[in-house]
Every structure is written in structure tokens, then in C-alpha cells.
Amino acid sequence: PGSVWEAVAEVKGTVLYVHPRLKAGEFIPAETVLIKIDSSEYQLAISRSAANIAKTQADLRELAIAEDNAKKMIAVEKQSLILAKGSIERKRKLLKHNAAAKDDVDQAEISFIQHQQNLLKLENDLALIPSKKESLQAVLEVYRSDLEQAQINLSKTVIRAPYDCRPGDVNIKAGQFIKAGQLLFQAHGTDVTEIDVQ
């Protein structure tokens, strides 16, 4: 034959279907489905990758909402800080004129410090959001790659004749487990035959 095709399994799995005419010497038209390998493992990998992508996208949306909320809370906390500072100043003036207790001033200062701490925490939380976003984007790319690989593997569970051919020896049966890289059979092209001429 002018061309010989070696059918090699690119994925592992149990053979579910073997074409009834996949026998030595039979004629097989191009694109005929010759072997189907159990695809449940690869379909499961696709489902798992799709679920991981959906979860990561939800995490990214949640992070965007958290960023927006943190910005709003910072604005509120800054306003509260201004009010707390004003309260301290008023109570100190009243204390000078003996119109307020020292405890009132201390309480106002404690409130001011708490607002400062809250503001600092919110600003730190906001500063961490870009790195969290980058991390989630990287995870999302990994899951997208996993999905693409699973789809490629799924497509390899069906083996078709690449052109019109006649199979050589076939040693494969339905129910048999095959490994990736295993030679399944050879098929000889029918379009050209090479003849040695002396």
C-alpha cells in the first residue's frame, strides 16, 4: 500500500464499540467510526472543570462586590473619623471650662482610635483585593486549560478511518481495556499501491 495508518490509542479506557467490519482485508470508507472508547471519565473531567470555572467566576464577582463595599465603607469611616475628631475637640473645650467629665473626653478619644483602626483595616482589605483577583484569574486560566484538555481527550475516544482503507491484523475487542499509546491495528490505504519493478 502507498500509505499505512497505525491506529494508536491516544487515551486509555474500555473499548465500548468495535465496527463489525473492522477485520483484516475488509474495505472501510473514510470517516467511518471504527472504535469507541468509554468516555465517562473524560465527560466527568469536563463537568468538573466547568463547575470549577463557574465557581471561580462567582468568586471573582463576589470579590468585585467586596471591593465596591470596601470603598463605600472607607468613605463612611472617613466621615465617622471627622465627626469623632470634632467630638473630641468639643469635649476638651468643655473640660477646660469644667463643663464635661474627663471620662467623656477619654470615651471620645477611644471612639476616635476605634474609627482609625476600622479605617486602617478597611484600607488594608482593599489593598489586598488586586492580588486576590490576580490569583483567582490564574486559577481560572488553569481550569480553562483543564476543560480544553478534557474536551480534547473526549474527542479522542472515537477513532475514525482517516481515509478509505483495508485493515491489517486487528487484535481489539469490545470490553477490552486499552492504554494510551497502544497500537490497535494497521490500516492500508486503497488509493495508491506501490509495486517494486525490476
Image (tube, helix red, strand yellow):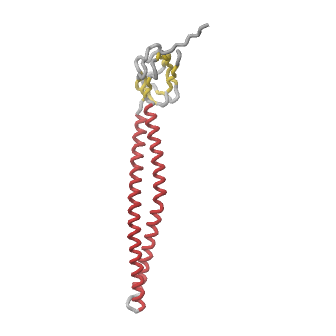
Tell me which corner region of the image, top left, top right, bottom left or bottom right, holds residue 121. Answer: bottom left
Total numbered labels placed on residues in the image: 0
Question: Residue sitting at 46 percent across and 13 percent down?
Answer: 25
Question: Residue sitting at 41 percent across and 89 percent down?
Answer: 95
Q: Position of residue 182 (x, y in %)?
A: 52, 26
Q: Is residue 159 above or below residue 197?
A: below
Q: Is residue 22 above or below residue 87?
A: above
Q: Which of 148 and 118 is in front in this view?
A: 148
Tell me which corner region of the image, top left, top right, bottom left or bottom right, holds residue 93. Answer: bottom left
Question: Residue sitting at 52 percent across and 28 percent down?
Answer: 181
Q: Which of 103 and 89 is in front in this view?
A: 89
Residue found farthest to the bottom: 97
Residue found farthest to the right: 198
Q: Where is residue 195 in the image (x, y as percent from the top left)?
A: 56, 10
Q: Nearer the viewer, residue 163 or 87?
A: 163
Q: Position of residue 106 (x, y in %)?
A: 43, 82
Q: Position of residue 131 (x, y in %)?
A: 49, 57
Q: In this view, does 79 lie above or below 41?
A: below
Quadrant showing the C terminus: top right
Q: In this view, does 75 lie above or below 60?
A: below
